[in-house]
Amino acid sequence: MEISIKKNMIPPQINKFMKTPTNLIRIAYILSTLITLLSVSTILLSKYSFIFDLFSHFQFQYLLVMIVFLIFFAVTKQYLGIGLLSTYIIFLCAFYILPVDFLPLELNEKDIFYMNTKYANKETNSIIKEIEKTNPKIIALVEPNQKLIQKLTEIHGQPILQINSGTNSYAIFTEQETIESKIIKTGDINTCYIDFGDYILLTVHALDPLSFTKRDINLEFLAKLNQEIVRIEEKGKKFILVGDFNNTYYSGTFRQYFKKYFKKNIYSWEPFKPWSIPIDHALTNTNIAISRTKKLSSDHTGLIIDIL
């Protein structure tokens, strides 16, 4: 039995509507307005709502969609659309997205190598090779598995701080002398605290923000972490805070606590994929240079920090 399939399954009324240039322009105006409102509302309301906070992290993706509409408006000579959309794009880039870093840094003798190495990662050799190229004074890892810790221990000796707890694992390696090292526990989240004298290194790994409960835990953690930073600064000390925050600069909560310590957006999670977001950060009250490694075997790239 032969089955006949029509070439055009779109109803004639819709097909006629879509072929009318004026109607396509109207649709472009409506959709570009909606995506702009989504961007604005998630930035402004992320501090107050779980849903807005969740969608606030995709500002770069919203930007790309806006650029597509901007090109459409340019082709169709819609000067109002060009003016309005380009104005918001400039605002979004100037105040939230820039400065941004997509490209890896040349690796040679850096101060700190930080990375979420992904606990389920079975291929750790590429990470070890990248660390050896960097030749860092400090290696700060979150989600390291036992295989990776064992290999690094053979090269760099025992970690100065270590937590073995699945995806909440940490390992900090260094040969530098330290004044104090400790683990600060806030609910289900740990902070590795190491005082090197010249500065204090904090390493963190927040929970993913995919539920109301986890968001509440993260909010408590970020508040306590900010209090710790205030105590450090009251002592006149410098600090560098590295970690997987599972949070971006686009979130109002993140900016509330860490805006003045923020340096740049680094798209470290799933780089060069449409859903990539900058959730790994290096925050500080001193001068540093930050970039990222190339894509390795983890879903995160590493951050390379130079103290200036």
Image (spheres, rainbow, N blue to C red):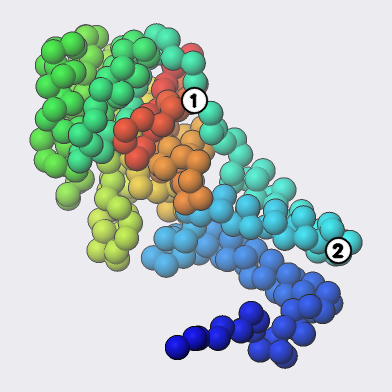
Q: Position of residue 22 (x, y in %)?
A: 84, 77
As helix, strand or loop, the secondary structure at mark 2 comes to loop
Which residue is nearer to you in this view: 19 or 270? 19
Residue behind mark 1: 104
Task: Give me the residue at 71% from left, 89% from top.
Answer: 12
Q: Position of residue 104 (x, y in %)?
A: 49, 25
Residue 35 placement: quadrant: bottom right
Q: Position of residue 271 (x, y in %)?
A: 46, 40
Q: Would residue 50 be found to the left or right of residue 40 on screen?
A: left
- Residue 166 is tagged as none
Are the residues tagged 1 and 2 within 8 Å (C-beta)? no
Task: Give me the residue at 30% from left, 24% from top.
Answer: 127
Residue behind mark 2: 76
In the rendered image of this protein, does residue 63 appear above or below residue 287?
below
Which residue is nearer to you in this view: 160 or 59? 59
Q: Position of residue 173 (x, y in %)?
A: 21, 18
Which residue is nearer to you in this view: 77 or 241? 77
Going by the numbered disc 2, the residue's amino acid type is: Thr
Task: Give me the residue at 26% from left, 59% from top.
Answer: 214
At label 2, counting other C-alpha atoms closer than 10 Å, the crowd grade (few under 14, some 14-19, many 20 or more) is few
In the rendered image of this protein, does residue 69 appear above or below residue 200?
below
Task: Give me the residue at 65% from left, 63% from top.
Answer: 36
C-alpha separation, residue under disc 1 versus residue under disc 2: 38 Å
Residue 201 placement: quadrant: top left
As helix, strand or loop, the secondary structure at mark 1 comes to loop
